[in-house]
Amino acid sequence: MEEITMNNQITDQNKSVYKTENQGRKGLVAGLTVALALVVLTAAIFLVQNNKKRLQEASIFENQKTELAMQLNQRDSIINEWVLAFNEIESDIKKITERENMLSIQSMDPEITQDKKNEIMKEIQIIRELIEQNKKKITSLNSQLRSSGIKIASLQARVDTLDAHIALRDKDMAALKTELIDRNFEIGQLNEKVGTMEIAVAEKESKITQQTDEMNTAYVVSGTYKDLKEKGLLIKEGGVLGLGRKESLQENFNNDNLFTQIDITETLTIPVNSKDAKLVTEHPANSYALIKDNEDKIAYIEIKDPATFWKISKYAVVEVRN
């Protein structure tokens, strides 16, 4: 009995131990499960946070990439605008140089007229305005280069070159304008001298013309002896007892309104229209001829050699007899 009782006690103890061990294993499993769950949860949280961070970093990177692309596009756009501005300025400089060369050739003309000089001065003003416009463009480009923060040595060098070219063209235009003004002063002095010379020449020509007119001027009068005597032009000299006296021209006569003034280079005939006529004044016989009409009247005196006819006297007194 005691043995059976002891066996039962042992069995109960074994059961109790088994039960205790079984409960311990269950607790351990539960603990491990909880721990594993915590690990999984922690890993999940870590992964979520890490993935969120990566997404944020990716978003930041994408934004930076977009911003950089925008900056690059903006920079390219600015550079393209600069290149266009460079090309415009270079084209203007070419035009300025061509017009300057043309003006230089025109201004070298020694016989430049006032109208031509005015045209050149207007052209210089147009070029100077074009130069000023391009100066402003270059100043604006320099300002844009400084404010943009873009540092490209080749662009700055190009701007500096354009600036130098514009400055040279401006200097040349100023020199050309000064030269024209100086030449205008010299031309003014020359014109003044020429004007003085022209006045002197005109005076000489006037004097020569007057002398020529005087040399070519002659005086003609015709009439009967009675008419000529009454006018105080003729007298009779010589002869004996009133016979054989010869008509001659009165000295110191008054020729006002008595003679007809003629140009010996144009007047080659002296009208007579009388039966008979003679020259009282002395003229070489071979220098003239008495020309008759159909009625056997003397129509006129023909001056065949004006220089010889008027050589002795510039007065021709014709005595006619009806």
Image: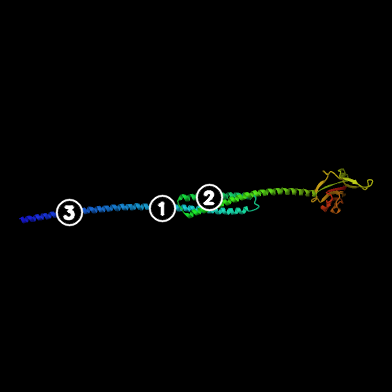
Give the CA distance from mark 1 to mark 2: 34 Å
**Hey, what amino acid is under mark 2?**
Lys
Please tell me whether mark 1 sits on a helix, a strand or a loop.
Answer: helix
User: Residue 256: which quarter of the image?
Assistant: top right
Tell me the residue that label 2 is attached to: 135
Tell me the residue that label 3 is attached to: 24
Give the CA distance from mark 3 to mark 2: 97 Å
Please tell me whether mark 2 sits on a helix, a strand or a loop.
Answer: helix
Give the CA distance from mark 1 to mark 3: 64 Å
- The quarter of the image holding the N terminus is bottom left
* Percent x, y of residue 71: 43, 52
Q: Nearer the viewer, mark 1 or mark 2?
A: 2
* Percent x, y of residue 322: 88, 47
Tell me the residue that label 1 is attached to: 68
**Hey, what amino acid is under mark 3?**
Gly
User: Residue 259: which quarter of the image?
Assistant: top right
Please tell me whether mark 3 sits on a helix, a strand or a loop.
Answer: helix
Q: 38 left or right of 90? A: left
Q: Can see residue 35?
A: yes
Asked if labels 2 and 1 touch by Cβ distance under 8 angstroms, the answer is no
